[in-house]
Structure formats: structure tokens, C-alpha cells
Amino acid sequence: MKTLAKLLKEKNAIVTKINNVKRRITNENIVVNDNVSKWNTREEYTKLLNLTNKLVETKTNIARLNSTVADKIFRLSELKAIVAFLMQIDTSEGKNVVSDRYDYSRGETIVKVAQMDSVFVQEQIDSLTDEINALQDELDAYNHTTQI
């Protein structure tokens, strides 16, 4: 029996093959004068269409099997997006000299105060990462035990 985890690996392999075929078509479609291409791009295009059909079928099977854990998958994705956002927040504090845009010798000293300081942001990242890891463990277990 094939598991969902195996099906997910197959999907990734199909995506890799599609990307390789697209690259060959892009790189080999035009030849100069008497040069001969190593690849027949029309045949490669047929492969692309066949692989795309296989990918759609595989993704459809994955979606069907994932319907019972869709909420966990969506939550995992959104939590990862929040962590990525938090990692970009400027939490620097203290005195800074802001130079005049036209005259760098003139500058104004400002004091920056972060509403969400680095400690708060890191605590949020750590907390969300714990939830992400728990969700990922749940989904990994589901993927390895769900039979197709």
C-alpha cells in the first residue's frame, strides 16, 4: 500500500521533472544555423503535457486525502507566514543620527522606541514555532499512516 507521504514525494518528483522539461524547451528551442539541438522540443512539450496531467491527478488525490486535515495545513502555512513577518520587524532601539538627505554633515539625533521589542518578538516566534512543530508532527504522522 502507498501512503500519503509517498504520494507527496511523487508529486515533488513530478514537479522537478516538469521544471527540467521546461528548462530544456527554453534552452534548446532555438538553434543557430547548422547547429543541432540535443533535444527535440516538440517531444519535450508532449512530455510536459503528460507530466502536467499526471501532476493534476496526483494533486487531486492529495487534496482528497488531505480534506480531513485541511484546517491544520492552512494553519501551518499561515503560522509560518507570521513567523517570516515577525523576523522582518525592525526592533532596534536607542539613539540614532538621521542625516539630512542633501547634506550629510547635518544630522538630527532621534531616539527609537520599539513597541514590539526584540524580546517580545522572539517570544512570539518561539511560541509560534512550537505550535508549527506540533502541527507538522501531526501532519507527518497523518501522511505516514494514511493509505491511498
Image: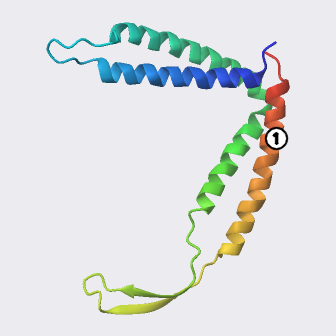
Q: Which amino acid does label 1 sit on?
A: Asp
Image quarter of the C terminus: top right
Which residue is located at x 71 percent, y 61 percent?
125
Residue 27 position within the rendered picture, expressed as x and y whole percent measured from the top left: 32, 23
Tell me if residue 78 comes above or below residue 117 in the rendering: above
Image quarter of the N terminus: top right
- Secondary structure category for the residue under label 1: helix
Tell me if residue 87 comes above or below residue 97 in the rendering: above
Q: In the visual, does 15 lie left or right of 140?
A: left
Judge by depth and name the residue closer to the eye, 101 or 19. 19
Q: Name the residue under label 1.
A: 137
Which residue is located at x 59 percent, y 74 percent?
91
Tell me if residue 99 comes above or below residue 52 in the rendering: below
Which residue is located at x 68 percent, y 68 percent?
121
- Answer with the quarter of the image where residue 116 lies: bottom right
Q: In the visual, does 97 lie left or right of 35?
A: right
Total residue callouts: 1
Which residue is located at x 83 percent, y 30 percent?
142
Q: Residue furthest left?
A: 33
Residue 144 position within the rendered picture, expressed as x and y whole percent measured from the top left: 81, 27
